[in-house]
C-alpha cells in the first residue's frame, strides 16, 4: 500500500494539536503521528499531553513532501518501474496531441524498456528533450465520431427490439 499523502494546508498554523487531534485532522493513525515525532516533528515541550504547534507541523510535512520530489532534468522522463528520472532509449519519441497546445510524450526507458509518458506543451518539447527527433502521432478518435455499437447480443431484450 502506498504511503499516505497528507496535505499540510489542513493544519491551522496558530493552533496547538494533541496527538489524537492531529491524527484526526490529517486522517492518519495516532501511531503515525508518533512516528513523525521520532522522525523529527518537534513537540512544544516534554510534558504530557504531548502537543505540537501548527507551524512546526506544517514545516515538517512540507519538508517531507519536498524531499520526495524527483525533478526530471532536461533530456529525461520519469520511469515508474525504475522509480527515477531516466533517459529515453534510442528510437522513436512520439508526441500524441490531445488539443491544439498540449499532448503526451511517449517513449521507452533506456534502462528497463518500460513505456514512459509525460504531459507537455508543444512549445516546450525542445527544452524537455533537446536534440531528439519527435514524431507527431495521430491522437485517439473521440467517442462521438465512432460508428454505432454492434447490436449483436444473446439477451431476449436485444432480440425483440
Image: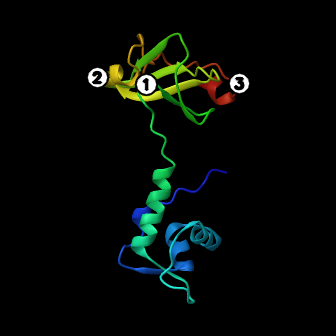
124 up-or-down from 83: above or below: above
State the residue position of label 2.
Answer: 123
- N-terminal of the pair, mark 3 or mark 1, is 1
Foreground pick, 152 / 145? 145
Number of the label disc, if any, that sits on residue 104: 1
Residue denoted by label 3: 154
Foreground: disc 3 or disc 1: 1
Neighbour class for label 2 at 10 Å: few (<14), some, many (≥20)? few
**Residue 3, placed above or below residue 152:** below
Res 17 label? none
Q: Give the crowd class for mark 3: few <14, some 14-19, many >=20 residues within 10 Å.
A: few
Location of residue 85 in the rendering, given as x and y in whole percent from the top left corner: 52, 32
Q: Which quadrant holds residue 100?
A: top left
Q: Is residue 24 left or right of residue 97?
A: right
In the rendering, at what x and y percent does residue 2 appear?
Answer: 63, 50
Q: Quadrant of the C terminus?
A: top right
Visible in this render: residue 125?
yes
Give the residue at x 43% y 24%: 104
- Calculate the distance from the C-alpha at mark 2 to the C-alpha at mark 3: 51 Å
Say which label, 2 or 3, has the lower sequence index.
Answer: 2
- Labels 2, 3: front one: 2
Looking at the image, residue 69 lies above or below residue 6? above
Amino acid at each position: 500500500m502506498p504511503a499516505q499523502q497528507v496535505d499540510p494546508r489542513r493544519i491551522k498554523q496558530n493552533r496547538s494539536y494533541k496527538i489524537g487531534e492531529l491524527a484526526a485532522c490529517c486522517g492518519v493513525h495516532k501511531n503515525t503521528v508518533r512516528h513523525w515525532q521520532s522522525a523529527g516533528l518537534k513537540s512544544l515541550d516534554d510534558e504530557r499531553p504531548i502537543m505540537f504547534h501548527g507551524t512546526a507541523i506544517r514545516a515538517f510535512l512540507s519538508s517531507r513532501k519536498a524531499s520526495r520530489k524527483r525533478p526530471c532534468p532536461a533530456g529525461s522522463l520519469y520511469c515508474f518501474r525504475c522509480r527515477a528520472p531516466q533517459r529515453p532509449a534510442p528510437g522513436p519519441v512520439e508526441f500524441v496531441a490531445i488539443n491544439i497546445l498540449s499532448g503526451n510524450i511517449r517513449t521507452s526507458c533506456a534502462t528497463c524498456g518500460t513505456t514512459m509518458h509525460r504531459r507537455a506543451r508543444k512549445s516546450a518539447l525542445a527544452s524537455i528533450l533537446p536534440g531528439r527527433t519527435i514524431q507527431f502521432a495521430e491522437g485517439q478518435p473521440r467517442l462521438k465520431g465512432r460508428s454505432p455499437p454492434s447490436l449483436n447480443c444473446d439477451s431476449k431484450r436485444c432480440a425483440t427490439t
